[in-house]
Amino acid sequence: MSTFDRDFLIQAQDIFLCNSVCGIIPVILIDNKAYKIGVLTRTIQSELSQHVVSFL
């Protein structure tokens, strides 16, 4: 697990959390600053869902 400071996160274009139960979870709000779900996050979600379906 990595730790990032607030300045690093504020500059990010895509922010997401991930784990083996929930998959990819977009972060849409930090300290009252709204973030859009970015292309990278959507792409990773899509790729993961394709692999999970093919695994089942």
Image (cartoon, rainbow, N blue to C red):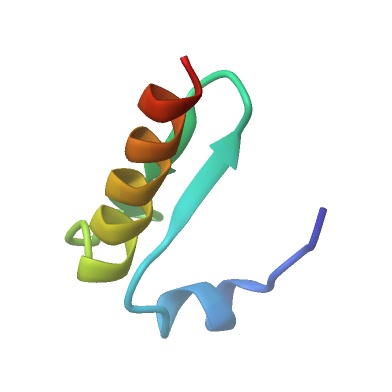
The answer to which image quadrant residue 24 occupies is: top left
Which residue is more in the foreground, 23 or 37? 23
Residue at 41% from the left image edge and 85% from the top image edge: 11
Q: Is residue 5 visible?
A: yes
Which residue is more in the foreground, 15 or 41? 41
Is residue 52 found left or right of 5 in the rendered image? left
Residue at 77% from the left image edge and 63% from the top image edge: 3
* 44, above or below 5, in the image: above
Question: What residue occupies the far top of the structure in this picture?
Answer: 56
Q: Position of residue 20 (x, y in %)?
A: 63, 27
* 4, above or below 26, in the image: below
Q: Position of residue 43 (x, y in %)?
A: 28, 59
Q: Position of residue 16 (x, y in %)?
A: 45, 52
Is residue 33 found left or right of 22 in the rendered image? left
Residue at 27% from the left image edge and 46% from the top image edge: 46
Q: Is residue 27 visible?
A: no
